[in-house]
Image (cartoon, rainbow, N blue to C red):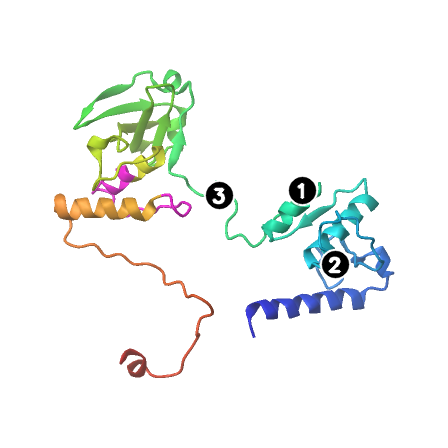
Amino acid sequence: MTEVARNARQASRFLDSLVSESTNNIDAGVPLQMPGNKGATGRLFLQTQFINNELPANMAIGKADNAILGVVMFLHNQQPKRSVILVSKDINMRIKARALGLDAQDYFNDKVLEDTDLLYTGVLALPQDFWDKHGKDMKSGPQGEHTFYNIQGPLCRDMLLNQFVYQENGSNPFYAVVTEQNDNTAMLRTLTDYTHTKNAIWGITARNREQSFVLNLLMNPEIDFVTLLGQAGTGKTLLTLAAGLVQMLEHKLYSEIIMTRVTVPVGEDIGFLPGTEEEKMSP
């Protein structure tokens, strides 16, 4: 009754409908557009002949993974002009295939959002000639502990409020945030360097450029809502809690911190249980 078993049964139904509706010789391949999949232009080939195992002698013949690799090796030798690629979610199987000189790829279609280029990064790298094109009639001056730059030029149209801009050239990098933007003009303000120990937040310093950007966002009380995206272990929760504790306990900006986490069930979920609200809430 598991989801895996249901998917396996559905896959078998797809294969059965493909093979049963095909009038061609199965050895010639079954057209994939048979069940109404007009977008599929390829053919499905079934292993209909005995394949001599051409794998190294120290690889166990009885293992299903090795049997599949044997088929891939056979097709690779049988079709020298075609690109024969093993597609598998099994990372160890892909490693074994590459060790045997076979092409292997992961299955990408089930990724939630693989193309991260579509996401807004919040960061803009300035080209090397940025100041040459945007430094004319520039106004700059101190703004509290920071320095502001009022610039104009073609790149200003692409800038967004609270977006970070940077230019790393040698030992004197430039890091700033966009505080104003209007057509081809923009206001840039330099950042607090949270990689330095003097600016440590609750004893924590930023380890890289991105973490310093994050702390500049989290420590700005004028920004009400911040979203962070990154891989596990990049410090999203740690930096957020440190900034919250400093602003609540030291700066006295807030009276409390509310932290919530998504509950991830271990194993299968129990699903729906009958009962009234009173019965559910009484425990």
Q: Residues within 10 Å of mark 3 (few under 14, many from 20)?
A: few
Q: Residue 100 magenta-drawn?
A: no
On screen, residue 57 above or below 215? below
Residue 162 shown left or right of residue 41 in the figure: left
Mark 1, mark 3: which one is toward the viewer? 1
Q: Residue 232 magenta-drawn?
A: yes
- The residues tagged by marks 1 and 2 sit, at their Cα atoms, a distance apart of 35 Å
Q: Which residues are magenta?
A: 215-234
Dot 1 amino acid type: Ala
Give the farthest residue toward the front: 58
Dot 3 amino acid type: Thr
Instruction: Give the percent coordinates (x, y) of residue 118.
Output: 48, 42
Helix, strand, or loop for circle 1?
helix
Dominant secondary structure of the residues highlighted in magenta in the image: loop
On screen, residue 267 above or below 77? below
Task: Mark 1 or mark 3: name the one nearer the start of the chain.
Answer: 1
In this rendered view, identify the residue nearer to me: 208 or 251.
Answer: 208
- Residue under the point 48% across and 43% down: 116
Residue 92 shown left or right of residue 40 in the figure: left
Task: Mark 3 or mark 2: name the one nearer the start of the chain.
Answer: 2
Observer able to see residue 162: no
- Residue under the point 29% across and 46% down: 238
Task: Mark 1 or mark 2: name the one nearer the start of the chain.
Answer: 2
Q: Which mark is residue 116?
A: 3
Question: In the rendered view of the protein, which quadrant contains the C terminus?
Answer: bottom left
On screen, residue 180 above or below 141? below
Q: Which mark is residue 37?
A: none
- The residues tagged by marks 3 and 2 sit, at their Cα atoms, a distance apart of 31 Å
Instruction: Give the percent coordinates (x, y) of residue 12.
Output: 70, 68
Would you name the residue on which mark 2 appears? 33
Would you name the residue on which mark 1 appears? 99
